[in-house]
Amino acid sequence: MNDGIHGDASDDIIDIRHLTKVFPSEHGPVEALHDVSITLPRGGFTSIIGPSGCGKSTLLRIIGGLDTEYDGTALMDGRPIDGPGRDKGFVFQDHRLLPWFSVRENIRFALPDSRKHDDDLIQENIDLVGLNGFEDALPKQLSGGMSQRVAIARALANRPKILLLDEPFGALDAITKIKLQDQLLRIWQSEGITMVIVTHDIDEAVYLGQTVVVMKPHPGEIKRVEHVDLGTPRSRVGERFNRAKDLIYREFFERDTNS
Amino acid sequence: MVEKVLTGITALRSATVGAASSSATVVKPNKTADESASAASAQSRAASPARRGGGIAAAAGKWALYLALPVIVVAVWAIVGARSSSYAMATPQQIVQATVEYAGNGELWLNIAVSIARVLEGFLVAFVAAAVLGVAAGVSRRFERFIDLVMQVLRPIPGIAWIPLAILWFGIGENSKVYIIFIGAFFPMFVNFVDGIKGIDKRYFELGRVYEIPKWRFIRQVVVPAALPQMLTGIRLGLSGAWICVVAAEMIGATSGVGFMLSDGRSMSRPDVVILAMLIIGIVGKLMDDVVEWQRRRIVNWL
């Protein structure tokens, strides 16, 4: 199954090789992703960072099975990813809650018919994101941060093998963002679910990811894969965090001026 | 009749909204700063006692503004009417007298009831037709294309223009009236049903794929509620279209209904009865609209 180049197969949940994605456009085909190869370790937290147009969201959508038209291979647990499903949780940038459903019903919506009536399971997931007391609230009554927490609870309700987050905190204020990042880390540690976050925020990428994948645009390519060790619990201040951040900053700014 | 419609609406509502959000939602704010902001906005609807006191004055002002124009119109009309007399025009006092007369002998209530019953009959037939064709055209692009040209050509033909043909086909009995009302109610509903379904946020379909939602559950829990606001707008327009058409239909070959009252007033040379009938048409039309709008807001409580 694995040729050895990409490391030990049993440790990797996602294995992407020579992935190229071309979008048609008015000015001819645009290469959104060019020959991307990457593996993601099971149980790890990976950040994908890059400027807009670098194909980071496209890559995430392919991992999530939302985009299945591409050249190359994308495998999850050794099998080709041929569509979305409950084993791959997806949190969109917009919370995408159904406005006519309460918090409880939005989470119920994600469950298969066999578990639809498991109110304890629903409550457990509401508690997980700290929204107990808001079960009956409609999305219009929630703040942006709370809505995104419901979206995370909904994505986790089926205990997917992997949770994919597409700039989930991009629209939130800085304070709320930091709280939600910490909450996400806590859930990652307690649930042991593989997580991948796409972001354009360097602090966020470094703080959350054990691995930071830096991408560049035109065409979308992986520029560098950086391993970050902030220890547990992570700290947003201090030598380790700043060093890791500097590394990523340099990726963006120094080499760009040369090219 | 009225009961049927209300149960119909209630059934529609419970089918679409499901167990969720049917009762008033209670938000218990007890969390961190993130929550307290939105909790405050949720609470802001319940005004403080001090603000409520000011609210009464503000509400009285709004009502005064709302009612000022009709009061002025009636006052001017009464003054001008008292100074001149004409067989072609009635004074407000004469209209009040006509109201007492028609309400007393029961004709007023009978005519209103008959017209409303006709409207509901035609409206319900139109609703079923618009629901079947509108949902089909909203879901299937091919079916929409298939019926589009016929609908586009038939739509500009007003209900009144159908009267001669309706009489030739159905005679001057009830069926021709129901047919004309059907025409008046069908198109606004059809158009809004199609648009309501076509306008559903495409991102919801992605959500359905991610959570592997079966087709019928998706239609029930996503498509119908997402299209519902505009479908209810269509129902509102359809009902007012039906009400306009019932009056037209009753002006020819009817022996009851508010449209009959109108033409009967003319043949008796009683402008007071004519104007009374016109006012009834306007008032009943507005009240029906209010009821639908009130129900719409109650059903679509998530916007």
Image: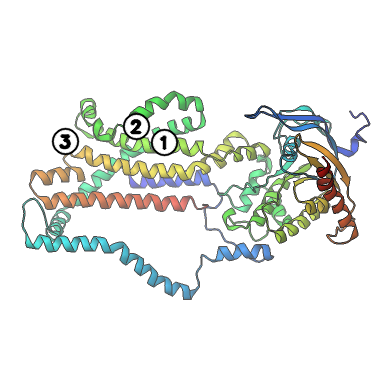
* Whether residue B64 can be seen here: yes
Tell me what residue is drawn at x 38 percent, y 49 percent. B292
Quarter of the figure with the N terminus of chain A:
top right
Disc 2 residue crowd, few under 14, some 14–19, many 20+, Cα 10 Å: some
Residue A229 appears at what percent x and percent y? Answer: 90, 52
Apparent side of residue B188 relative to residue B99 in the rendered image (left or right): right
Residue A38 appears at what percent x and percent y? Answer: 84, 36
Tell me what residue is drawn at x 32 percent, y 44 percent. B240
- Amino acid at circle 2: Arg
In the foreground, B113 or B135: B135
* Whether residue A187 can be seen here: no
Q: Residue A242 appears in which quarter of the rendering?
A: bottom right
Residue that badge 2 annotates: B155
- Which chain's residue wears label 3? B
- Amino acid at circle 1: Val
In the foreground, B246 or A56: A56
Disc 3 residue crowd, few under 14, some 14–19, many 20+, Cα 10 Å: some
- Amino acid at circle 3: Gly
**Res. B191 mark:** 1
Apparent side of residue B74 relative to residue A74 in the rendered image (left or right): left
Q: Are marks 3 and 1 in contact (CB under 8 Å)?
A: no
**Res. B253 mark:** 3
Q: Earlier in the sequence, mark 3 or mark 2?
A: 2
State whether discs 3 and 2 lie on one chain.
Answer: yes
Q: Earlier in the sequence, mark 3 or mark 1?
A: 1
Spatial distance from mark 2 to mark 1, Cα to Cα? 9 Å
State whether discs 2 and 1 lie on one chain.
Answer: yes
